[in-house]
Amino acid sequence: MASWRPDPTFYPSPKMAMQAPRERLGYVALLDPGRERPDALGVLDLDPDSGTYAQIVGRVEMPNAADELHHFGWNACSAALCPYAPHPHVERRYLIVPGIRSSRIHIVDTKPDPREPRIVKVIEPEELHRRTGYSRPHTIHCGPDGVYVSALGSPEGDGPGGVFVMDHESFDPLGRWEVERGPQQLAYDFWWHLGYDTMVTSEWGTPNMIEGGLDPQILLNKGYGRRLHIWDLRRRRHLQALDVGEEHQMVLELRPAHDPARTYGFVGVVVSLEDLSASVWLWHRQNGSWGIRKVIEIPAEPAEPDQLPPLLKDFGAVPPLVTDINLSLDDRFLYVSCWGTGELRQYDVSDPFNPRHTGSVRLGGIVRKAAHPASGPLNGGPQMVEVSRDGRRVYFSNSLYASWDEQFYPVGIRGWIAKAEADPGGGLSLDPGFFTEVGDGLRPHQIRLEGGDSSSDSYCYPS
């Protein structure tokens, strides 16, 4: 797969990536919540001039049932252009698609026909366990020297979780990344500041803490994750833990500034035990170390108990449940999914210490069930969110994680995907012509855009 010139979808800086051609296709993880049929990777037509715009035009069936496809990513990306990248001529061609429940990893070739991708290799769970000591792979990031993957725990379902590395040409798991993990035990997301040789990781829970659904006892005992961990990326050693306080539970998606000269990033926190609010925190470098502070708080919305699922009846309110965030490539707009209240928020984070709420759209929600112009009342809510490289289009899906879907939406989630248009000056509106009902009982999770998007690449050169 090596070529004599860098892949044309690689860009040295985020500013240059924003000038890339518009995406024509998207890839979306589709899961069977009953775990009786194989999950699939759907191909979504994103070309507005196409007769099948906003339709799923291709589907790759996985070879086994019960994988629960979740987050996935490319084998290579713009990070391959970093000055120290040992493989500058790798190609963005293969999608690494893990099952978060099975620990099986599928390698999907998107060429020669991006509309008809095909599975070319499957890494079975036993091989992953044997080579890394980890299970339940979660986040995929293409790095300068390989594919980095976070994992939630051990093969037995306990801690510690962590990060392992795969060769981005052979796709062989190479082994555990951490040389010295310090106090880190819980795992979830990770990303990095490549220019500062720094990795950041976040915390959810071990597989045994989450696979049966949200455990109210663990939550009330403040047992889910509440810390970020700062690592020496080159030396693979733990440096510092940043604690958001035990009342804040589940510190999930990490979005560092794309410009490698900026040393800050945002992380979403699902819920506060004090008032069910959700929040976004800013980590930042100061005086040679790293600090963290809350910069966005989103309150819960009052609701009648008979409108709420059993898990929430005693609280009389709908928590926003910030389950995903995404940052535009110019580092100006942060998008925040409120899966519980059914809202996608846009913030201007030009001043990262003082975000301004600049736009919002509503779809679904536990109580609101807000409709799209092309639909009736909807359930689920904005969840996984992906921003186009130019920052003008925001795609989002409505399923979180099968066992948690059932707790917050007990009638069962009907899968849909929608798109919002982002005004370059600030503001957000639904595209009335884009609404995709997944059908066939499948639920959509992460969306990846052809040629890259705002959460797939890392850049080594400032804008």
Image (spheres, helix red, strand yellow):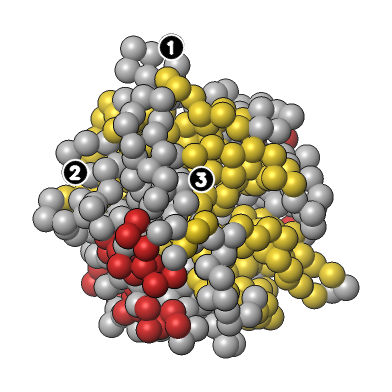
Number of the front mark, 2 or 1: 2
- Mark 3–mark 2 Cα distance, whole angstroms, equals 23 Å
User: Are circles 2 and 1 on residues that touch, CB within 8 Å?
Assistant: no
Secondary structure at badge 3 equals strand
Amino acid at dot 1: Asp
Residue 279 vs residue 331: left or right?
left
Find residue 219 and report its horizontal and vertical position in percent.
Answer: 44, 79
Q: Are marks 3 and 2 in contact (CB under 8 Å)?
A: no
> Label 3: which residue?
343
Q: Which of pointers 3 and 1 indicates the residue nearer the eye?
A: 3
Q: Position of residue 392 (x, y in %)?
A: 61, 29
Q: Which residue is mark 1?
A: 49
* Residue under the image location 70 percent in, 33 percent down: 426
Is residue 288 in view from this perspective?
A: yes
Q: Quadrant of residue 40?
A: top left
**Circle 2 residue:** 441
Would residue 186 appear left or right of 127 to someone viewing this image? right
144 or 362: which is nearer to us? Answer: 362
Determine whether, in the image, residue 312 is placed left or right of residue 35: right
Secondary structure of residue under mark 1? loop
